[in-house]
Amino acid sequence: MKHGKQHQGVHRLCPLCGADNAGKKPSVYSQDEWIIKKCSGCGLVYLENPPAYEELEEIYAWEKTSSQRSQERTKKESALRQYVRKIERYKDRLIRRDKLIDLSEKYFPVGPVIDVGCGGGAVMSRLDKKHTPYGIEVSKQLSGSAQEIATARGGHVFCGNALEGLDSFDKDYFVAAIMSAYFEHEAAPREVLQKIKRVLRPGAPLVIKVPNYGCLNRLITQKKWCGFRYPDHVNYWTPRTLKKIIADTGFDIVRFNIGDRSPISDNMWLIARKPA
């Protein structure tokens, strides 16, 4: 594992507290030229030298790396973990569980909904017809697929990074926002939250789903944890750090109970709200 070769990119301060950890020893979870640090100030674990947005659009686009990463993860996972994952998938199909859609039906009012990091539009396609889907996606190929879904329902997808995409929408336009499997990818999470708050209507909810770096599976499997993805996972959130950045950017936390941040789950969910 090479820690000496620094990826040619912008050196990133801690995205949670702004501390400069340049002099701090790389984490054992660093890989090749990708340098992971644990902030000495707030404890957030993050990628110090993330790829530029332009690289995410082309070189590290999701559709180009997902298959390879899935194969690598399968090789690394223990037989027991693979068996547990199969049971979880079967259970979800059996009880028709779709937590994101369940949450949208419970918390989202009628109107336009923005899906940040919408991928190919899978979530958009499952939203109730009372919601007009909008999205932001950095991958050109995936955004094209999502655009077809959004257009058919009166919405639109912005192809590009979230900072520019959110600036393209009017203030107080959306009744709700979704960030599912996105916030771990965003090099400027604080700035994105501030921009999301601008485009949300007062009282509008925000649903976030991210990998839980604080889960027991990560502590047990260490470097083999399924939540590691190089170089596009740039933030490794725990319940404490996720809660802090949401509160620090002026959102009210509506729901973040033990079921949403279970230590035995690789993922966690948080429902926030723009103050009314």
Image: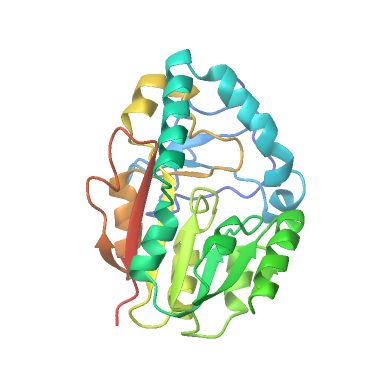
- In percent of the image, x 33 and y 79: which residue is there? 203
Residue under the image location 39 percent in, 67 percent down: 105
Asked whether residue 249 is in view, the answer is no
* 221 to 275, vertically: above or below: above
Q: Residue at x 42, y 28 (%)?
A: 87
Left or right: 272, with 53 as reference point: left
**Horizontal side of residue 119 vs 41, given as left or right:** right
Towards the viewer: 109 or 265: 109
Q: Left of 107 or right of it: where is 118? A: right
Question: Is residue 117 visible to us here?
Answer: yes
Q: Quadrant of the C terminus?
A: bottom left
Instruction: Return the residue nearer the eye: 160 or 47.
Output: 160
Taking 50 as reference, is 222 above or below it?
above
Residue found farthest to the top: 79
Number of marks drawn:
0
Q: Which of 177 and 190 is in front in this view?
A: 177
At 63% from the left and 55% from the top, the residue drawn is 119
In this view, the residue in front, 56 or 177, is 177
Image coordinates of residue 54 in percent, x first then y, are 73, 55
